[in-house]
Image: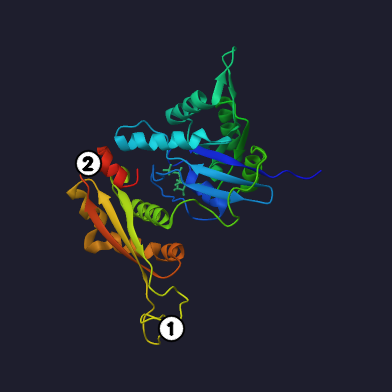
Amino acid sequence: MQEVYRSGFIAVVGRPNVGKSTLINALIGSHIAITSSRPETTRKAIRGVMTTDAAQIVLVDTPGIHRPRTLLGQRLNDIVDESLSDADAIAFLLPADQEIGPGDKRILSRLRSQFAVKLDDGGFKWKVPLIGIVTKIDELNRTELVDKLIAINEFADFTEIVPVSALQQDNLAEVRRVFIDAMPEGPKMYPDDQLTEESPEDDIAELIRGAFLEELDDELPHSLAVVVDAIEYPEDAPDSEDGETDSTVPGEPRPKAQVHVSVYVERDSQKPIIIGRKAEHLVRVKKKLRTPINRIVGCKANLDMHVKVAKGWQSDPKKLERLGF
Ligand SMILES: Nc1nc2c(ncn2[C@@H]2O[C@H](COP(=O)(O)OP(=O)(O)OP(=O)(O)O)[C@@H](O)[C@H]2O)c(=O)[nH]1
């Protein structure tokens, strides 16, 4: 009997900092989704595409589902709703190193209202498979892990529970297998080498935002928006033969692409925090991202960053729109 090909969408949900981006990166083997030690760095439903011989799965990474306090929070939640609505399965991530908390309960009740039917006996029947992924198992010893798995098994009626450590590449193959099994039969939707649906501008903006959040000691996650205003590619593409700025002219530096970026904060007082003493934050972020940005742009690139103030952008619909929300 011939094996069927499977394809579909999986919405990856979980409270902030549970390890969504790290898991998606580990599964796909690319660093498109940003990771940072700070919560709520994943702002868009970044889609990574995992392609194997047996299946193609579009992973929809969602911002931590949280109670909206601002218009921005509301928009983030709308993005979550959107990415959930076309899901063929849900991967609900729970951190092994923390207790099940109110955040997890809120996510569960939200998933139930959208994806489950209530049964007469008070239980729920899921319309799509609900896969429990226990993340960061490297933080626990064997006995602790067993207790954790029991607690998670009692927390919700998961179709399947898979423990994993994305950081130590432990049990990733099992996650892939369970994901593939949950997909309906279907054809490939993307070429094999496509890892993400984001544009280079979006990819770069996410990288820069993530790098700043890693860099800063202050709690600024929501006050920071990054927009790539333009990418100017050099006149002569990297392998072009002629032109004044020809990269083959001896002694002439190779022409670089220019990446123009605006980093928006909400208040004047936040500007120096972002920039740092003697522009140290800007310098470190640039240095850290040189290689990944060159790779996204396809040639050497110069990062031209300007820190700007957009007062109250999180609550201003027009500004939110301009900043890509
Ligand atoms: N020990 C351990 N830490 C992990 C693992 N996976 C992720 N982390 C760490 O957990 C933190 C958060 O990881 P992210 O992947 O950014 O989490 P996220 O859920 O995408 O976060 P948000 O975008 O804020 O929702 C980072 O410091 C990771 O290094 C793991 O398998 N083991």
Q: Could you classify mark 1 by the number of other residues whose Cα lies within 10 Å: few (under 14), some (14-19), or many (20 or more)?
A: some
* Left or right position of 206 against 57: left
- Amino acid of disc 2: Gly
Residue 14 in view here:
no
Pick the quarter of the image with the C terminus: top left
Q: Residue at x 43, y 70 (%)?
A: 299
- The residue sitting at the right extreme is 1
Colour scheme of the picture: rainbow
Camera-side residue of 10 and 281: 10
- Decide which of tag 1 and tag 2 comes sooner along the chain: 1
- Amino acid of disc 1: Thr
> Mark 1 = which residue?
248
Camera-side residue of 13 and 218: 13
Q: Residue at x 41, y 48 (%)?
A: 37
Above or below, 123 relative to 56: above
> Mark 2 = which residue?
312
